[in-house]
Amino acid sequence: SASDSEESTNLIDKLKSCADPAKLMEYAQTAITKANGLLESKKFAEAKAFLAQVGPTIKEKVPSLTSTIDNLTDIAAKGDQASQYVDQANQVVSGFQNIKL
């Protein structure tokens, strides 16, 4: 839906214009949680498109999340065979949520 891509654009703008590392991490986490939600819902094409939009900015602004973005992108790209990878994504994301700044 239009609101979804608008939301992505807003998130990208926030990430791009943000200088506060804590806020950056918060925005990045929002994006990662959203991507993971799409994967859990088996919306692989949407997840792929969303990650293609936000991924490069997150990698640029929060390099420590590069592997998380790559993992999620990889899972989205595998599409329908990805059910087995969704558990893996959850592990990646829950591991990520335990990272303290």
Image: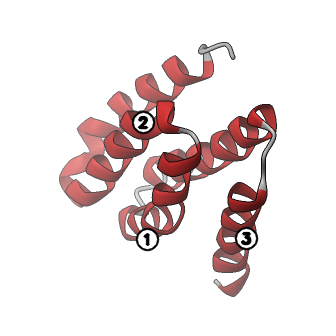
Marks 1/3: CA–CA distance: 13 Å
- Tell which circle, 1 or 2, labels the residue nearer the N-terminal end: 1
Tell me the crowding category of disc 3: few under 14, some 14 to 19, or many 20 or more residues within 10 angstroms, Cα based.
few
Marks 1/2: CA–CA distance: 16 Å
Q: Report the side of 22 relative to 99 (left or right).
A: right
- Tell which circle, 1 or 3, labels the residue nearer the N-terminal end: 3
Picture layout, residue 52 above or below residue 84:
below
Foreground disc of the pair 1, 2: 2
Which mark, residue 49? 1
Residue 93 lies, in percent from the top left, at: 50, 29
Task: Read off the residue under disc 3.
Answer: 7
SS type, badge 2: helix
Outermost residue on the bottom side: it is 2
Tell me the crowding category of disc 1: few under 14, some 14 to 19, or many 20 or more residues within 10 angstroms, Cα based.
some
Q: Report the side of 59 relative to 12 (left or right).
A: left
Marks 2/3: CA–CA distance: 21 Å
Contact between marks 2 and 3 (CB within 8 A): the answer is no
Task: Read off the residue under disc 2.
Answer: 68
Q: Residue at x 34, y 52 (%)?
A: 73
